[in-house]
Amino acid sequence: MTAKIEAIFREEMLGEVKDALHAIGIVGMNCFEVVGHGRQGGIELTGRTGSYQVDLLPKIQLNIVLSDHNVARTVETIRQAAYTGDEGDGMIFVLPVSEVLRIRTGERNGKALSYQDDIDQRTQGA
């Protein structure tokens, strides 16, 4: 079985999150620049002309599809790397994936997700 992790976090934490994921063997991922807000509702900025509310803040959305047995470790790695302790650190969502297909080779599911020196190969060798 496979799962998709969607993590939304502060833009400035992307380098730390990517480095932490590479360190545990996560090879494939997609990143998007997104805007949004959660409980904080945005921020208030003050300039020479007065104050105004910015309710859609820039964030990064990182998507990873991986084997179920790697989800907990990957989620915790993202959480630790993206953590600042301040409001607006982000959210992580875990979703089920029913099928994966690599277009070029026709490989499906686990074979389609495997990369050289990925998290699965590292854990099998340990």
Image (cartoon, grey):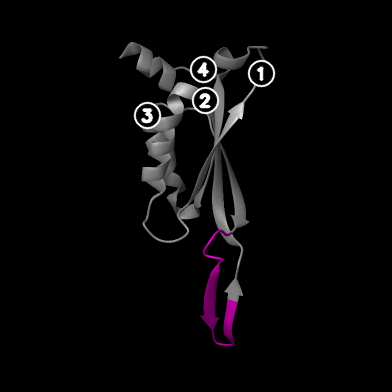
Compare marks 4 and 2 and give the one earlier in the sequence. 2
Amino acid carrying mark 3 in the image: Ile
Which residue is painted at 64% across and 20% down in the image?
100
Element class at badge 4: loop
Element class at badge 2: strand
* CA gap, disc 2 and disc 1: 13 Å
Q: Which mark is residue 89?
A: none
- Relative vertical location of residue 118 with respect to residue 87 in this rendering, above or below: above
Question: In this image, 100 relative to 71: left or right?
Answer: right
Amino acid carrying mark 1 in the image: Leu
Q: Mark 4 sits on what residue?
A: 114
* CA gap, disc 4 and disc 1: 12 Å
Compare marks 1 and 3 and give the one earlier in the sequence. 3
Q: Mark 3 sits on what residue?
A: 24
Compare marks 4 and 1 and give the one earlier in the sequence. 1
Q: Which mark is residue 66?
A: 2
User: From which residue to which does the magenta span run?
Assistant: 37-52
Which residue is painted at 41% across and 15% down in the image?
121
Asked whether residue 117 appears in the rendered view, the answer is no
**Answer yes or no: do the residues labelled 2 and 1 have beta carbons within 8 Å?**
no
Q: Residues within 10 Å of mark 3 (few under 14, many from 20)?
A: some
Q: Mark 1 sits on what residue?
A: 101
